[in-house]
Image (tube, grey):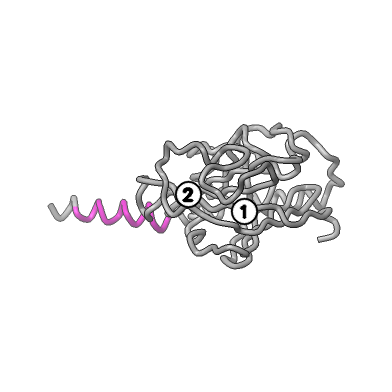
């Protein structure tokens, strides 16, 4: 019984603490590589960065920054657990919009607990808070406009170009953040919606 109890404690410690250490280190390395590539090259517009979802699964292509939460994580294509989310990355739902699209919904997912927990604090976001997404060529500023405290994982309406449950009623340039809720549970999804309010070339940031 004592051995079983100790094993359980060690497992929980690994999931809650060590997985965060590993994933954050991987995410930091991925972000540094992305920023270095942007500095070394003079990136030309390419598939994916200009609206076409042309990145390979697991490929990093942007960085998300949320000043209120002191949050800064790389964004990779796909929402695969082993390939993206468990590495502490923020994943882009394939088939949803990209920041440079004329209209669309840029939908992202990340862990709320363990594996770097990039989206642990997104429940603190309120209307008016800023979300910034930086790509090789541009910086996009979004303003939080609303949220859903909890919706079933089967609620795919939040992935639509005009996301279901959002305050938006017409086509526009939106961002949607998704993560598990409540904490340490996969019962539901916490959703945060934002709308584009500014765009400028990355060189001017």
Which residue position holds label 2? 179
Which class describes the residues within 10 Å of circle 1: few (<14), some (14-19), or many (20+)?
many
Q: Secondary structure at mark 2?
A: strand
- Residue 3 in percent (x, y) is at 18, 52
Q: Main secondary structure of the magenta part?
A: helix
Q: Is residue 101 magenta?
A: no
Q: Quadrant of residue 48?
A: top right
Badge number at residue 194: 1
Q: Is 174 positioned to the left or the right of 125 in the image?
A: right
Q: Secondary structure at mark 1?
A: strand
- Tell which of 114 and 180 is nearer to you: 180
Which tag is nearer the camera, tag 1 or tag 2? 1
The stretch in magenta equals 5-18
**Cα–Cα gap, marks 1 and 2:** 15 Å
Residue at the outermost left position? 1
- What residue sits 73% from the left and 53% below the top? 140
- What residue sits 46% from the left and 56% below the top? 20
Q: Is 1 positioned to the left or the right of 97 in the image?
A: left
Q: Quadrant of the C terminus?
A: bottom right
């Amino acid at each position: 019984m004592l051995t079983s109890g100790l094993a359980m404690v060690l497992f929980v410690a690994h999931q809650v603490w060590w997985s965060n250490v590993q994933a954050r280190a991987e995410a930091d390395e991925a972000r540094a590589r992305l920023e270095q590539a942007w500095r070394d090259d003079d990136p030309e517009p390419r598939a994916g960065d200009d609206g076409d979802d042309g990145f390979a699964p697991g490929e990093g292509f942007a960085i998300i920054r949320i000043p209120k939460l002191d949050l800064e994580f790389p964004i990779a294509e796909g929402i695969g657990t082993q390939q993206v989310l468990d590495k502490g990355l923020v994943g882009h739902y394939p088939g949803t919009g990209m920041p440079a699209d004329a209209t669309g919904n840029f939908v992202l997912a990340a862990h709320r607990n363990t594996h770097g927990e990039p989206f642990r604090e997104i429940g603190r976001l309120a209307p008016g808070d800023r979300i910034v997404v930086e790509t090789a060529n541009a910086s996009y500023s979004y303003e939080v406009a609303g949220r859903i405290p909890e919706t079933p994982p089967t609620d795919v309406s939040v992935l639509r170009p005009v996301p279901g449950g959002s305050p938006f009623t017409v086509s526009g340039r939106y961002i949607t953040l998704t993560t598990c809720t409540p904490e340490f549970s996969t019962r539901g999804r916490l959703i945060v919606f934002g709308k584009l309010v500014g765009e400028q070339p990355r060189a001017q940031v």
